[in-house]
Image (spheres, coloured by chain):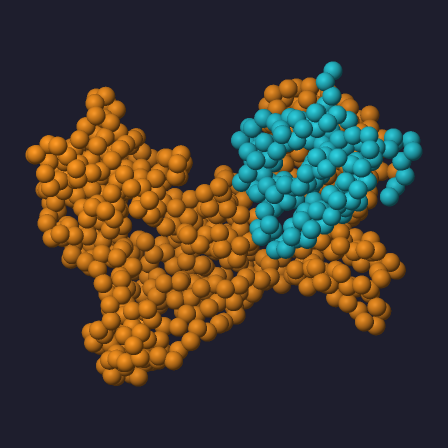
Amino acid sequence: MSRIGVFVCHCGLNIAKTVRVSELAEFAGTLPDVVVAADYKFMCSTPGQELIQNDIKKYNLDRVIVAACSPLMHEKTFRKVIANAGLNQYLLSIVNVREQDAWVTDSEDEATAKAKALINGAVYRARLLQPLTARFIDVNSDVMVVGGGITGIQAALELAETGKKVYLVERNSTIGGHMAQFDKTFPTLDCSACILTPKMDAVLQNPRIELMTYCEVEEVKGFVGNFDVKIRQKARYVDHSKCNACLACTEKCPGRGTSEWDEGLVKRKAIYIPFPQAVPQKPVIDRNACTYFKKGKCRLCEKACGQSAIAFDQEDTFREIKVGAVIVATGYDLMDTKPLVQYGYGKYPGVYHALEIERLFNSAGPTGGKVVMRDGREPQSIAILHCIGSRDKNHCEYCSRVCCMYSLKFAHLLKEKTHGDVYQLYIDMRAPGKGYEEFYNRLVEEDVKFIRGKAARVTDKTDNPDFAGKLVVEVDDTLTGRFATIPVDMVVLSPAMKPRTDAKEMARLFNLSTDKYGFFMEKHPKLAPLSTMTEGVFIAGACQGPKDIPDSVAQGTGAAAEALTIVVKDRLELEAATAIVNPASCCGCQSCVRVCPYGAPVFNREKNVSEINEALCKGCGLCAASCPASAIFTRHFTNDQVMAEMEGLMEF
Amino acid sequence: MDFEPKILGIACNWCTYTGADLAGTTRLKYPQNVRTVRVMCSSRINPSFIIRAFQLGADGVLVGGCHPGDCHYGTGNLYARRKLAITKKILEFAGMDQKRFRVEWISASEGNKYAEIVEEFTRDLKALGPQNTFRIEKDSRERI
């Protein structure tokens, strides 16, 4: 005989609006073994928690059922509540009457009937619940940050500041990310490099940050507190321990590769550093562009190098590191605008995308900071087209959040540098941020022409002789209601921010979920924006969704704090719901040993039975369902418990 | 009164259960015929659970897991996929209409997919009518 207490939460009106909560509590009170049933406005509030705790003592309860929101929300809260009242925390059952009941129907009758069935199921299950003892594991105090953009840099610096060792893994040969490509940042117009490069340098100088550039994460094993990570160091063909960064090699190199850094606007050498302030300030060889690798002859860089640092025979190497927590800050890709043929990117040389124009502004860019087009002309008229791919149900339904603001920045810089006519073609002007609306107002004053309408087409074909040699932008001006054609020299596209093309593989590597666009999914959109469903793995920055620099930096700092909550501990409590083998029924077939992804079941040859190494068990239950002898129990999810719950659910 | 089928849902904690929560958070409406048991992984599901659900009077059983390849535990749902495919054959062999047993891969971001599937499944089960193939009344039930 159990003594069960059932506590029904109103959640304000969230549940009470659709579920008749007092009727539900009354019903629960009639169920066998239920000795008390109560309802309350907010069970998770302090008075609500006290109500449960008082009833545990008053009625000498040995099982507690809370009918409230999803267990994913508050199971931990209520476990603590009953533990503080002296009950084992596993003697709790949460009934989800909010997310999976009250919120998904408008019918009071249906919602209440379903809630009754759910509570009945929980009562059946609760009777069979067993107290479990939590396990503890030691925690590795190091953290790995993946991605060396501004978000990753910020996270790494913050963590190092707390005294923790950080591995900062970056796939490119330098850190800096997209921010290092920008010239100015909105809305303050401070120079991007001026605010970023000190941070990049701080990373390099910090003895607690181990910078791993030109590296990729190959494999992540283990779990919160104890991740084993395998990292591939891609061959640089330059021994960085010998290189003194004189860059004599790059002067002599005859090879030519496409400069990713300058968005393909110019060529770079085959042995190169991406940009003058790159960190580390040491070159790598682009194998595909290198004359020696292609033709077997050249080696001019080797001759130029006084340090004998060139190492053509270098190969990829692997390294294993152990960390307690991981921060994924892998950033975004700009949408490829070529498939949007109506805008003529790739067809007309006068059409540029946002990152290309950033490079044209930049004094370290291909034009030394002058706005000169591919044909050498300085544009006299420029149209900036917003929402290319964003807010478009055919491509990315979401708003990319930053494009309005950087388009305004472009307008300002283009005005400043060319004194030409600048047109903004926008759907809505979105300026939600500190100083953003003010920046917009400033641009309105700066004689930039704002046309409210999404550009329909960019073409060079026109009947109007005045437009000859121009690109003509066609747009429905929704304010005047007229169809407008604007002749310009240059068109700038502001494309959508998208997940990295390999985001899916990354997600698998780190065991993350992705949303429907491919951005990494947070544990809770409001209350756990940096946590993920995988404990100990955090996300920050644009890999979670489009973000501007201030938001990314804030998230970097936030993720560092999240990671710290784990690595600051010596020991971590693990879920106690693990598998256990009943040696009396084990037939020694080793099915469990074969299926377990964690190697938790170990075969004991002496006793001829399997045993579970609890430290490795994650409690998924695969072994239990695979055991032909039903000798394995998954604690907290035993066959009996699951089937009893099913029985209760099907009774009503 | 119209026949209201009872669906026993078994959802994995990480994908489908979370997806079902998302359907609620975004206030999607779907029929209230499904009652869900949460398990940590679809691989936890023993084929006997499915048979038992039908014995207990479920008109349909809906199993939800992460998309193959996206399992929180790496490979769990791949085992579940194989096991449940065989379960489906066994059910059919035993005379159960295959349409009463669905296995769906619903990720944590697919609240709408969850709602759509429940809607569709409820509709199909209404057309099929009550399940009596395996049903055992309470008095004559024995524990498996």
Q: Chain A in the picture: what colour?
A: orange
Task: Locate residue B121, reporting x and y percent.
Answer: 66, 31
Question: Does residue A41 show up?
Answer: no
In the displayed image of the protein, which residue is found farthest to the top?
B1
> Which residue occupies the foreground of this view, B86 or A105?
B86
In the displayed image of the protein, which residue is found farthest to the left?
A466
> Which residue occupies the foreground of this view, B73 or A65?
B73
Quadrant housing the N terminus of chain A = top right
Identify the image quadrant of residue A396. top left
Identify the image quadrant of residue A161. bottom left
> Which residue occupies the foreground of this view, A68 or A161?
A68
Task: Locate residue A613, reporting x and y percent.
Answer: 73, 63
Quadrant housing the C terminus of chain A = top right
Identify the image quadrant of residue A604. bottom right
* Chain rendered cyan: B
Tell me: B71 left or right of B7: left
Task: Locate residue A574, reporting x and y percent.
Answer: 66, 55
Q: Residue at x 84, y 68 (%)?
A: A608
Tell me: A8 left or right of A384: right
How many numbered marks does the figure carry? 0
Tell me: A155 left or right of A254: right
Question: Does residue B91 show up?
Answer: yes
> Which residue occupies the foreground of this view, B68 or A409?
B68
Q: Residue at x 56, y 42 (%)?
A: B108
Task: Locate residue A329, reporting x and y percent.
Answer: 43, 54
Relative to A635, say whether A398 is above or below. Answer: above
Q: Residue at x 64, y 44 (%)?
A: B65
Q: Residue at x 30, y 35 (%)?
A: A431
